Image (cartoon, rainbow, N blue to C red):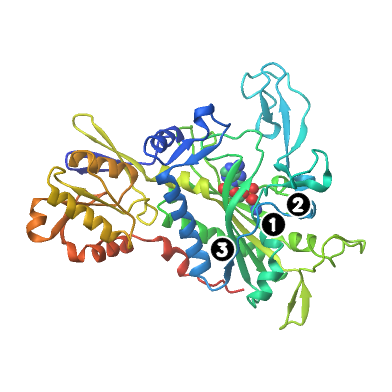
Amino acid sequence: MTINVICGYILFAMAAPNIDTIVSLAKRRGFVFPSSEIYGGLGSAWDYGPLGVELCNNVKQSWWRWLVYERDDIEGVDSSIILNRLVWKYSGHEATFHDPLVDCRECKTRMRADKIDGKCSNCGSTNLTDQRFFNMMFRTLIGAAAEEDDPAALAYLRPETAQGIFINFLNVQTAMRRKLPFGIAQVGKSFRNEITPGNFILRTREFEQMEMEYFVKPDAEHSKLVDEWVELYLEWFKGLGISGNNLQLHEVPEKELAHYSRRTVDIMYRYFPERPEEERQFEELMGIAYRTDFDLRAHSSKAVDSESQRINPDSTEDLSYFDEAGKQRFYPHVIEPAAGVNRTVLAVLMDAYSEKTNDKGETRVILKLAPQLAPIKAAILPLAKNKPEIVGMAKAIKRSLQPVLRAVYDDTGGIGKLYARQDEIGTPMCVTVDHQSLEDEAVTVRDRDTWEQERVEVAELAEYLQSRLKAAAPVQAAGAATSSLDI
Ligand code: GAP
């Protein structure tokens, strides 16, 4: 543990001690609220508040910039959430996207059979029902007059964003005149009727994914590519401020691989630091899978199985690729890095959390968010709220910064309290307007992490703040150095 002393406070540079600490901070300070709370809540549903939505957006924008803008080989799409039911038939999700389910006959708790040791996770009883399979896709009906049991009206909310990419492979490839290797990225909501959701935003029934399908030749070095993407994502997460000490790799055993995967490596985050090391401290943050040509073949009109039977008589398109150089037609293979927005946000919050305590035992929370992720970049604070000239100047500064960066004005407390509030929500810089500002047209800029203060001329403030934010921005750099994989 690193210990620094700042202004009489001792800084314990540490991550959050547990998820509950973040749940409490998140609600108190407007990051995440329990959903439908006034009606008793809804299972594990959560709503993102004013600061949470900014943090999520910043994570998604950082990811999009890193992959789609800074590399030359990745395009973006935004497909529908409700797709033709046949997509899920041929992707294999209708038949195989299920979890084993058991009920406890004693306390009626419902559990995933593969997550328990033959005993009820609630009461410890072994009096459990036989295991049965439960498909996790949310069902809905299309059409105002659709009957409950009309199979023609049945549709699903997507359980992964990936299929919206596969079914658009040919559209993107031809519209953008792409040659292999290239990737398609998508960020958006996915839905799974999880049997045991929980642990705040770690496992919910509605969540957001950032997925990218990277299409390569059948003879590419797939396993090496998985390793390369693992390395790139490790760097990306570190660029978001997550400590490498809290990240771990997990090679998914063959028997646990998803139906489409030949190899998957999970990047795990230490979401449960309070547990003893021998218990499970780490949980999946994202997975990087080698999906072979499974999905493109499965959706193709001409693909055949080992007995020369068409795999898909319903598809009207063949999603194969003609390689000009080799004069060959084939189904591209896929490396898929699939990350969760919500799990990334939780990891970012846990890692950014730190506390400072002074010799009177008073504790302050400092959220050391990477500045690019901070919901608010600068808070403009008047030293005296009863002085109209100071208030007017502070408000004018806030308005002038608005088009350049996210700034807020706050005069709802004394300066010490205002600083403490901004520290707790991770605002990297506070700008204080004082009596002298009226004379010298300068303000004090205070740093969240060092509490050091610097006097800056108002005319140069926007440029100064931007350069400070830029200097502290490792996020973009993470992917830029490796903008193209050489295959
Ligand atoms: N297309 C591959 C795929 O969906 P996955 O491992 O099932 O793979 C990818 O999901 C990521 O999506 C996970 O690593 C996790 O970050 C996120 N995720 C999956 N299920 C989730 C849930 N119920 N709640 C929150 N995030 C979830």
Q: Amino acid at mark 3?
A: Glu
Mark sitting on residue 88: 2
- For the point 42% across and 60% down, the residue is 475
Residue that carries the numbered disc 1 in the rendered image: 163
Residue 372 appears left or right of 236: left
Circle 3: element type? helix
Where, by quadrant of the figure, is residue 330 drawn? bottom right
Q: Give how far across and how far down residue 390 sits, in percent.
A: 14, 51
Cα–Cα span, label 1 and label 2: 8 Å
Residues at marks 1 and 2 touching, judged by CB atoms closer than 8 Å: yes
Mark sitting on residue 228: 3
Where, by quadrant of the figure, is residue 146 drawn? top right
Q: Give how far across and how far down residue 398 sits, in percent.
A: 26, 55
Cα–Cα span, label 3 and label 2: 30 Å
Q: Give how far across and how far down residue 17 sits, in percent.
A: 40, 35
Q: Amino acid at mark 1?
A: Gln
* Res 34 visible: yes
Q: Amino acid at mark 2?
A: Trp
Cα–Cα span, label 3 and label 1: 23 Å
- Name which of mark 3 and mark 2 comes first in the sequence: 2
